[in-house]
Image (cartoon, helix red, strand yellow):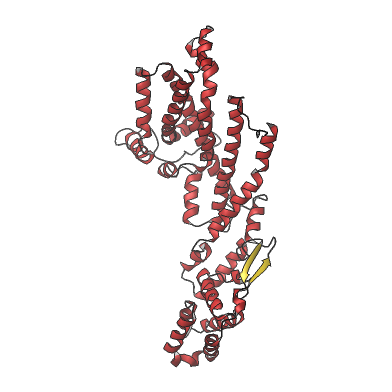
Amino acid sequence: MMAYFVRRLLWFIPSLVGISVLLFFLAQAGSSDPVVSKWEKTDLNPQQKIAKIKEDKQKLGLDLPSFYFSFHRQTVPDTLHRIYNSKLQDNLTSLAYEVGSWEAVHHYYAQIKKLHRNPKAAHLAEELLQLKSKKELTAWLALHENERSKSPELFERIKKLLAMEVKSARYRLSFQWNGTASQYHQWLSGLFFNQWDRSILSGQKEGKRLYKALQWTFCLSLLSMLLALLIAIPCGIQAALNPASLFDRICSTLFFGFYSIPNFWMATLLLILFASGSFLNWFPLYGVGEINASMSLGELLQIRLSHLALPLFCWTYGSLAYFFRQLRSALLIERQENYFIAAQAKGLSERMALWKHAFRNALLPLISIIGGALPALISGSIIIESIFNLPGLGRLSVEAFLARDYPLIFTIVLLGAILTLLGTFLADLAYHWADPRIRMQKQKA
């Protein structure tokens, strides 16, 4: 038994590393660069934009290679990541593949940058930066032959590019070892040295904001789950004792009626009925309330409960039907087992037999649900947190995704992955506690 759990714990590390690598490269495959997008929207001139982009990339470590090692064609250098415009990278790479020489493309690009500094010819440079094939270069050259005087060197360089023949070397791969000077290593090591939460947009550490959002979401989610279990378990047991009774029908109808209502509709309805003042004004409309150090415990609880009562209800009601139905069905099955009939034959009442014997076995479906729901303790509810303006992780995740703030996104998703693995592990422990007959070790042949 112990060997099984030790193996499961040892699998945590490679599993988390694999998940982190997958997340990292999924983000790298994105079509847009958040740093470039940030400065492209400004009114700065092209040279100032490039300078700002370079400064931000260096500050955030985004000027480094992506991973510990890389493979690239010999016609493309290992320093291509230093060109900060991803579209320009693709255009120059495509051109290098076609002509078979990065050196020639590099000289061509250098001439374009010189031309870019000339205000009267900057538009020509912008046009050239959009081209990615010899065919497009040929058409551009024929169209602008009369403007050769603005940069004779550039026109000569383009003609040399067009005259170059394809070499077989362009298909050969080169291996480059980047070591710890890579974006992935900087992010991964930052997880252990409190640097994981640096924002791309502000360049500042967002640890306090993330920690605060995590606290709110975790507390509300945990409280919601406990409330749902405290309500669903007694109701499920009572319904299993008297199936098809009035109580059973009322609970089934009520809980499944709640389950069918979308939480955004329920949240809006509650705000209109109990917080808007149009009908009742029992609760605040949004937020978590302002508190200060001089408040007593009673005042603090009153403020928090009044602000969180409606969102907590919206967080809880959807789980009631699920927990209730699972427990009720499991208990009805356990009532038909021989051990339950034998316990009653020995003099135990039906209620005591359920609590002392059947309940433990009936917990197995609930354990699976709770173990799988553990990541939800930090993921929060995007809809509820947005409607009630709660400073939780769900709302922060949306802001990070909209801003393409990859370091923050990585951290939030990796926390979810850790809780998923932890939930599975704790579910295994709970399985063994609930039913010691379950054997985790491999059967010997």
Residue at 58 percent across and 48 percent down: it is: 414
Q: Can residue 216 be seen from the camera position used here?
A: no
Residue 63 on image: x %, y %: 61, 66
Residue at 59 percent across and 65 percent down: it is: 57
Q: Can residue 7 be seen from the camera position used here?
A: yes
Q: Report whether 300 appears left or right of 281.
A: right
Q: Nearer the viewer, residue 164 or 40?
A: 164
The image quarter containing residue 270 is: top left
Seen as rendered, the residue at the extreme front is: 445
The image quarter containing residue 437 is: top right
Q: Quadrant of the N terminus?
A: top right
Residue 66 on image: x %, y %: 61, 62
Residue 288 on image: x %, y %: 47, 39
| Relative vertical location of residue 403 with respect to residue 327 in this rendering, above or below | below
| Relative vertical location of residue 118 with respect to residue 224 in this rendering, above or below | below
Q: Nearer the viewer, residue 368 or 403?
A: 368
Q: Quadrant of the C terminus?
A: top right
Q: Nearer the viewer, residue 48 or 73?
A: 73
- Figure disc tally: 0
Seen as rendered, the residue at the extreme left is: 278
Seen as rendered, the residue at the extreme top is: 347
Q: Report whether 345 appears left or right of 18.
A: left
| Relative vertical location of residue 375 with respect to residue 197 in this rendering, above or below | above
Residue 180 on image: x %, y %: 69, 60
